[in-house]
Image (spheres, helix red, strand yellow):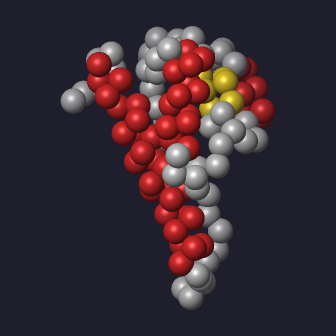
Amino acid sequence: MSWPPKARKPSSSPVGDISSKRLQEEIQATGGPRPYPVAIDLADRDSPQKIKDEVFKKFGHVDIVVNNAGGSRPLSLDAPDEAWDESFAINFTAVRKLTQAFLPVMQDRRWVAS
């Protein structure tokens, strides 16, 4: 299998996962470049901008964003609002804000449809 299938091979791949060593090795094993890990707490509302800043500092641009955030833990219906807020921040708000951070640049580079 070539990396990525039917697409231009990326020069590098930032990976936002604190335990991404195995993922990095899997990507390299398929012929891809070693990903650049970005360890960050997506419950922090400033994280998407921090990711964008770090990626642009290191690479100068981005071609593709894969929003693969997720983290859940079983919550009871009467769990405190803080627990629900944290889950929503990770699983929705961070994904939305990360997309908003990178989409204009990707559109400028004509990597996505407007």
Give me the residue at 56% from left, 24% from top: 55
Give me the residue at 54% from left, 56% from top: 90
Q: Nearer the viewer, residue 58 or 109?
A: 58
Q: Measured from the top left, where is residue 22 in percent x and y?
A: 77, 34
Note whether residue 89 is visible. Answer: yes
Give me the residue at 56% from left, 19% from top: 57
Give me the residue at 58% from left, 81% from top: 80
Q: Nearer the viewer, residue 2 or 68?
A: 68
Quadrant showing the N terminus: top right
Quadrant showing the C terminus: top left
Q: Measured from the top left, where is residue 49 in percent x and y?
A: 49, 37
Q: Quadrant of residue 75?
A: bottom right
Q: Measured from the top left, where is residue 50 in percent x and y?
A: 55, 36
> Taking 64 as reference, is 39 left or right?
right
Note whether residue 70 is visible. Answer: no
Q: Measured from the top left, where is residue 27 in percent x and y?
A: 67, 25
So how many labels did they put on this image?
0
Q: Residue furthest bottom?
A: 78
Q: Where 19 falls versus 79 (above or below)?
A: above
Q: Where 98 falls versus 104 (above or below)?
A: below
Q: Quadrant of residue 106?
A: top left
Q: Residue furthest left?
A: 114
> Taking 71 as reference, is 110 left or right?
left
